[in-house]
Amino acid sequence: MCGIIGIVGTAPVQDRLLESLKRLEYRGYDSAGIAGVVDGRVQRRRAKGKIAALQAVLTDSPLTATVGIGHTRWATHGAPNEVNAHPQSAGRVTLVHNGIIENFAELKRKLQSSGRVFESETDTEVIAQLLDAELAAGCAPLVALKATLDQLTGAFAIAVLIEGQTDMILGARRGSPLVVGYGQGEMFLGSDALAVGPFTNRIAYLDEGDYVAIDHSSAQIFDKDGKPVERPLKIVSASAALVEKGNYRHFMEKEIHDQPDACQHTLSAYLDPVSGKATAPGGVDFSKVTRIQIIACGTAYYAGLISRYLFESLARLPVDIDVASEFRYREPPVIPGTLAIVISQSGETADTLAGLRWCKAQGLTTAAVVNVHESTMAREADVIFPTHAGPEIGVASTKAFTSQVAALSALAVAAAAARGHVDATEEARLTAVLLEASRLIAQSIQVEDAIKALAPDLAKARDVLYFGRGAMSALALEGALKLKEISYIHAEGYAAGELKHGPIALIDEATPVIVIAPSDHLFEKTMSNMSEVMARGGPIILFTDDEGAKHAPPGIKVIIAPTSDDIVAPLVFAAPIQLLAYYVAVQKGADVDQPRNLAKSVTVE
Ligand code: M6R
């Protein structure tokens, strides 16, 4: 997970850049670097490995700059080595980048055919080359930056130095976060408040699509259309600088918005966009696995349920899945060749941990899909399948859930390839499709206002039903859990086909029904179930995509998420479903981040 810092200072910035990079270490990285302006020229220092390696480089060759940028890199495009480490340079431009440029290959081909020579394998260098080309064509820095951003597809944040513009750093964000820090005669850019925390507690959070130029005393901020804008200044408290809400009212809201970044960082740990390969960390050989046993609780269990569809359909691997509190006492027969996968945000959930220990004691290979990498499950499992959601503070799990789904989806592709059920071309296609997820999630969050408008009515309901088919039936369960845990409205999720086996008896004019139905091969069947509900007067809110919306009957409310491949649809529909629960809870004035009776980590049975 990459981290960014930029300082327009009045004193040498080297040590402060390093201090900030150390604060960004929690995000995970495999190389680091800084750059600064010395005598009008940009100089770089970079090293593979930990920040100590960069410090050693700086001891031999200090950087005396008072304006500089720094970066911790989590390798995505290109191996973790010094050449691929950031900052990346091209001509007058030197920059650091967090995120993935999805159309980098196409842009790189064009730039190469115009005579530009690349030194790294990174997608980042494409941004530097593009920006340098715009400057070389005579554009002013901010005009060149806007023209460059307009050519990029993907989720990213950047900080940029331009030779000849020695007291200025440019920045931009789309999908990945970036903050502006206001000091005394000094200004900062950083991935989060933590990055700039040692230097200032006065912070503005850039909005999606914003770009910015900072100098010694000010920030000029522009929105995605190039209109000058102001973003509110926040005073961040010392403790909040550790994990803070930014401009958001609740951690849950922030964490819903964190999901493009969280999923991208998670997917980057499994998928190589250059080779198109999916890899299972820890040397797990799926060709030798005969069966998967998933064990988890709550939301993590629903992430497991979603992944079952993929492990079975793509990798042809049988999957059993149990809630941990049942599994641990069920005494199931032990089937050799089983890979036991526990899923947990905290890595400390008592029942899940007991399930892990039971499987280990039976001699099964165990793997933990876990977000807290120092947790007990992470330490005790044979293998860690990490999620990189960052700290999740809201009790209602959001970004940890989608990161779990992302990691498991990538593992299903790795398993399918290892078992020979997809060829290299299909593996590369699935890899590319998954790597687009974070952009689609960012788009799906844009339905926020439409969802907010539904909250006043839904908040009056006593009961709400959710249904869907396939992986969307698991998302229906998760949607119902989200709603009940933070709004205290009774909600249940069902596989749509189950409705007429009982739940349809609950339908009346006062029982809203949430239908999750992308336009996939099950769409028509779900529409039939929806008609059965409508015939009984149940008010419907349909979550679908553009194509699905064309078939929506009149008189129902429709929320349109981006069109997506089946493999990423659960990720794309998750955020709108979470937002619905969030806004209903806000409408009811509930304690969103700390719902009654619930704990973030359930360490007792
Ligand atoms: O830390 P874990 O992922 O093991 O926690 C599991 C559940 O307790 C958790 O997902 C819970 O259901 C959340 N409150 C759901 O939002």
Image (cartoon, helix red, strand yellow):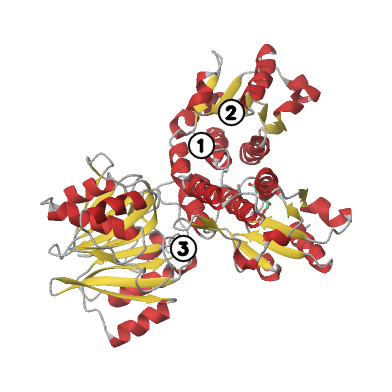
Can you say whether 451 is above or below 169 in the image?
Answer: above
208 lies left or right of 216: right
Q: Which mark is residue 242?
A: 3
Per the image, label 3 sits on a secondary structure element best described as loop
Of the image marks 2 and 3, the number of the one nearer the N terminus: 3
* Category of crowding for the residue at label 1, using alpha-carbon neighbours closer than 10 angstroms: few (below 14), some (14–19), many (at least 20): many
Per the image, label 2 sits on a secondary structure element best described as loop
Identify residue type, mark 2.
Answer: Ala
Q: Which residue is pictured at 22% across the width and 41% down the height? A: 226
* Category of crowding for the residue at label 3, using alpha-carbon neighbours closer than 10 angstroms: few (below 14), some (14–19), many (at least 20): some
Q: How many marks?
A: 3
Q: Which residue is pictured at 46% across the width and 63% down the height? A: 242
Res. 602 visible in picture: no
Most foreground residue, 21 or 275: 275
Q: CA distance from mark 2 to mark 3?
A: 33 Å
Per the image, label 1 sits on a secondary structure element best described as loop
Identify residue type, mark 1.
Answer: Ser
Q: CA distance from mark 1 to mark 3?
A: 35 Å
463 lies left or right of 197: right
Can you say whether 527 is above or below 411 in the image?
Answer: above
Most foreground residue, 507 or 146: 146
Which residue is most to the left?
138
Q: Which residue in the protein does label 1 denote?
A: 564
Q: Which marked residue is nearer to the observer: mark 2 or mark 1?
A: 1
Can you say whether 64 is above or below 438 in the image?
Answer: below
Q: Which residue in the protein does label 2 denote?
A: 459
x%, y% of residue 498?
A: 76, 28
x%, y% of residue 340?
A: 75, 59
Q: Which residue is pictured at 36% across the width and 69% down the height? A: 85
Identify residue type, mark 3.
Answer: Leu
Q: Quadrant of residue 459?
A: top right
495 lies left or right of 392: right
